[in-house]
Every structure is written in C-alpha cells, then in structure tokens.
Image (tube, coloured by chain):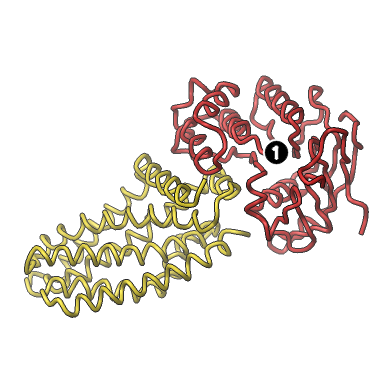
Amino acid sequence: MTEPASATSQPGRRASGGGPALSLRGVRRRMGRETVLAGIDLEVAAGRLVVLRGSNGSGKTTLLRLLATRLRPHAGTASVFGHDLVSEAEAVRGRVGLLSVTGGSYPVLTGRENLGLTTSLTGKGSDDDAEAALMRVGLAAEADKQVRYYSSGMKKRLGLARQLLMDPDLWLLDEPYSALDEDGKRLVDECLSEARARGRTVLLASHEQDRDALTPDAIVELAGGRLRLVAPAGTAPR
Amino acid sequence: MNDVQAVLAIARKDLLQELRSRAATVATLFFTATTLLMMAFALGREQAVLASATPGVLWVALVFAGVTAAAQSFQSDLEDGAFDQLMTYPVSRAAVYLGKLLANWLYLAVLGLVLAPVALTLYGAALPGLGSYGLIALAVALGSFGFAIVATFYAALTANLQAREALLPVLMFPIVVPIVLAAVRATEGALSGARSPVGDWLLLLAGFDLVYFVVCGGLFHFVVDE
C-alpha cells in the first residue's frame, strides 16, 4: 500500500482519542460500472484544513458523500475520529456536517424552518443560535421566505448557516464558493478560518484557485480515482 | 435527540411540505373524484350493483391515490439534495422510515375517512348502524397503515430511478394485494352488518400490517444507503 496523502498533526490540534480526524486506506468506490475512487489513501489530523482539487467528474463529491456516510466504500477501510464509516455510521454522523453543492435545504420550508429541522434532528444549536447563524450569513431578513424563492447563492448561504449551527467536528464542503458573490466567498473564508481556529477539521472540495484569505494546511488532487498531495502541510495555495 | 422526537420532526416536516405545496393533494383528490365518478357510470344504474361495488371502488381509489402520494413524499425530498442532507444527520434510518411512514399514513387515513362517506352516499350504500361506520373507519385506518408501510418502502427504493413513476406501482402492487383484499372484505363486512367476518378480516389486516412493518422497517436502511 502506498503512503497516504497526509496532513499531519499540528501542536495543540488533536483528534479525540489522539488519532487522525479522518483516515482512508485503499478506499474504492464504483458508481454504476465506473470506478470513481480507485484506492484512496488519506489521513488528516484534527484541526487541519485540507483543500481537495480535481477536474469535473474526478470523484470529489463521491469522496465527500462517502465521508458523510451517504455512500459505502466497496473496498478498503475508512474511519472518522476513529469510528468506522460503515459499522459505526451513526457515530460518524454525529461528528460530520456536509455542505452540498445544492445547499441541501427543503424548498417548500422557510430558511428558519430548515434550520429548525436541523436543530430538531441533530440536537445541536438552539433557536437563538439559528437566528445568529442566519444573521451571520446575511439571511436574517429573508429567513421567513420559502427556500424555493431563494437564489442559488442564498441557498448556499443557508447551507453555510446550517454548518455554523451544527459546527461539526469535521466540516465537509462541496464547492462552497459556487454561486456566491465575492462577499459570500469572503464569508466562507472567514467561517472556515474560524472553524479551524476552534479546532475543527475541514475538507473542502473547490475549483477556486486563489483564495488568498484561506491558507490550507494541505492541498490534495483527485485524478484517475487516486489522491496526490499537491502542496504539503504549511504551504499556501498558489 | 431521541428517535421519537426525530420521527415526529420528520413527519411534521413532510405534512407541512404537503400542506404548503399541495402537490399530492391536488393529484389525489382529482384522481379519487374521477375514479368514483367513472366507476359509478361504468357500473350502471342498478342500485344493488352500485352498493355492492362500494368497498372495491373505495379501495381502488385509495390505492391509486396512495401511490401518487407516496411517490410525491420522496420527490419533494430529492429536490436540492435535501434528502442527502437528512441522511447525514445522526438519526437512525428506522426513525427516518417511521417519520415518513407516519406522514404518509396520516395523509392516506384522512383521505380514506373523507372518501368513505362520499363513496357511500354516491353509490347509495346504506349503513346498518353507526357502529358500522366505526368498523369502516377501523378498516380504513388498518388498511391505509399497511398500504403506507409498503408504499413508503418502495417509494424510497425507486426514488432515484428514472422510471420511478412506472416502477413504483409495478413493484408494490403484488406485495400490497393481501392488504387491499383484506381491507375490501372488512369494509364489505361492515356494510353488510355481519360482525363476525368483519372482526376476522380486521385481525388478518392487523397481522399483515405487523408482518410488513417488521420486514419493511428492517430492510429500509438497505434501500437508502448506497
């Protein structure tokens, strides 16, 4: 087995139990007949921010959905904070939060109702926290409007509000900058930097090349179903 | 967060969505009204024939309306990746299934309880007594529960398929036949005023419900986890 692409520990940033935040070894996944992930090795220490790059269809979304327990690996082993992705999926779900490309909100519910549902189902946050999250992403005035009347950017902001509300130990973000204006992109940078400062681990799939405000600990690229370390820990993306 | 709260939150969310969008309501009401009227014309003017056909027509209308409602309950979830999001929350798959089942059942049961007096009136079926309507209500409650168990399961199974509208009834109708037959017989017995066979059919219906509930509830996570 090859050495996994790795974002190693920084002092003061440790996963619960001392292990890595996420660990994948030889993970394979097919979608239909196509092998999308052909042996992924990745280890990320807690508190790290890792950017995942790759062309369209390279498998970034598949990898994030797998880490969020929406897809099962067909081979290999995968764990998040020491919990196996398959046999301890519910424990994993308690520690991850996924921001999908589409935002993941119910169109017929209002922004506030969507966050209320998140609070009800995750047990994380309160009504006040939801209000604060809506305020933070600039949706306080639109909170009682049904999401089907939101623009794509507003849906993405609502998804970001959900992440802030849940504040999971592992943030999984699939193209968080897409559909956002420059203010929105800066907001994402700020939220991710703050999450990292709180010791959260972030895995971010993005095509954005020059986010100066964001200094990832590592950049990995997904190509041909395999991961390659592009920039090692401590290297800013350029 | 316990599973009961999760079940209630998901059911409430589904019912609120339906209340707002009325996507299933419009289709099911139109469909049931059309079925009742078309069957009434097809059966002719013979009062005895119309009355004896009432239980069958009532359940045909309910079954087809139920398929539409169940398919719609997952369809609205799939928009914008909301179902994906739901499935990443720390909630058991059983709670997700029960939440959606509860919403589908309540919707179908209310539809059945509204539809029954309309069908009885339209087809001129006389009730032997007030107790008979109670028995019909019980048959509707048990029959719609069994139907919702199967429909919710198969709606989840076909939700991501391109030909889901065609596949859902094809897959679920053979499974749901025993429930519908027992429900029709129980309704028929209630209308005839004969207590003994009604009780037997209701018991059989409850038995089918239990078996399907255990099987579909136990298999649900295989259907939604890819």
Work out whether A233 lies above or below A64: above
Position in image of residue A209 (x %, y %): 81, 30
Look at the image and tell me in which quarter the N terminus of chain A lies. Answer: bottom right
Residue drawn at 14 percent across, 76 percent down = B195
Query: Which colour is chain B painted?
Result: yellow
Q: Residue flagged by tag 1: what amino acid is it?
A: Trp
A37 on left or right of B29: right
A172 on left or right of A210: left
Look at the image and tell me in which quarter the C terminus of chain A lies. Answer: top right
Residue drawn at 72 percent across, 26 percent down = A194
Position in image of residue A60 (x %, y %): 75, 46
B177 on left or right of A176: left
B124 on left or right of A98: left
Work out whether B131 lies above or below B193: above
* Depth check, front residue: B177 or B102: B102
* Depth check, front residue: B131 or B152: B131
Q: Secondary structure at mark 1?
A: strand
* Depth check, front residue: A173 or A18: A18
Work out whether B208 lies above or below B112: below
**Chain at tag 1:** A
* Depth check, front residue: A232 or B24: A232
Position in image of residue A47 (x %, y %): 79, 35
Residue B148: quarter of image = bottom left
Crowding at dot 1, Cα within 10 Å, few <14 / some 14-19 / many 20+, comes out as many
Residue receiving disc 1: A171
Query: Which colour is chain A painted?
Result: red
Residue drawn at 81 percent across, 53 percent down = A24
